[in-house]
Image (spheres, grey):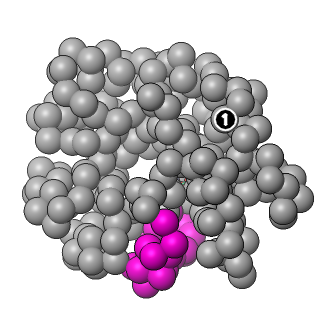
Amino acid sequence: MYRIAPSILSANFAKLGQEITDVIDSGADIIHFDVMDNHYVPNLTIGPLVCEAIRPLTDAMIDVHLMVEPVDRIVPDFAKAGANIISFHPEASSHIDRTIGLIKDQGCLAGLVFNPATPLHYLDHVLDKLDLVLIMSVNPGFGGQKFIPEALNKLKAVRQRIDESGKSVMLEIDGGVKTDNIAEIARAGADTFVAGSAIFNAGKDNDPHRYDTIVSEL
Ligand code: DX5
Ligand code: ZN
């Protein structure tokens, strides 16, 4: 089953509620919520207050991608704000297993995120505990960057590990996903596709087909 996760990083923040309602009405399955701290990544975005504000707008899962360091102290705030999935970067956590446990103790699904140069060995002792693996196909920090093709090999490797584990783990891709590469990304093994600029900047503000366009390529 494929899922599209529009990244609201590229939404018009002056009318965020309407933007979210639009993509949900178009069929989006998950809202991808990029949290940046101007420390782990060189950009600053949104936090638990915004998550809490959008929570009543939809039953869709809110997929919180933490690009923050340290990770642990912000996890309970996002859980209380209604996050369903909380993912973090292994480099930003001193104790990866502890952070995964903390996310799950808060009742959320846990994800681990791999930057383009982050080795997959971080999966070695925790894959069984994860609900999601997120492969970054750009360096984190900004929307609208170009897809790094090496991410396809990484996806294939992780798909194999997930299949061998026999566990149900979502495999998500994030960065530079467009209509012209989403089918190839799906063939490499991803089942969940973050798309920011491809959805929110694709056409006019009120273009009802911007979401359908990317789905149609799957
Ligand atoms: C980048 C973020 C992405 C970003 C994707 O650090 O994690 O979620 O918004 O944007 P596009 O789809 O425009 O590459
Ligand atoms: Zn993201």
Residue at the farthest right position: 204
Q: Residue at x 68, y 61 (%)?
A: 22
Q: Residue at x 18, y 21 (%)?
A: 165
Q: Position of residue 90 (x, y in %)?
A: 28, 50
Q: Position of residue 15 (x, y in %)?
A: 71, 78
Name the residue type under label 1. Answer: Val
> Which is more toward the observer, 15 or 189?
15
Q: Position of residue 96 (x, y in %)?
A: 17, 52
Q: Is residue 208 left or right of residue 54?
A: right
State whether residue 25 is above or below residue 40: above
Residue 85 inside the magenta-drawn segment? no
Q: Check disc 1 and report the residue beneath it.
A: 215
State whether residue 73 is above or below residue 127: below
Q: Regarding mark 1 in the picture, which secondary structure is present there?
A: helix
Q: Is residue 122 left or right of residue 57?
A: left
Q: Is residue 25 left or right of residue 137?
A: right
Which segment is the magenta one?
A: 34-58
Q: Residue at x 30, y 48 (%)?
A: 111
Q: Which quadrant would the N terminus be assigned to in this image? A: top left
Q: Position of residue 30 (x, y in %)?
A: 48, 52
State whether residue 81 is above or below residue 41: below
Q: Residue at x 70, y 27 (%)?
A: 217
Residue 182: image quadrant is top right
Count of marks, rendered view? 1
> Which is more toward the observer, 33 or 21?
21
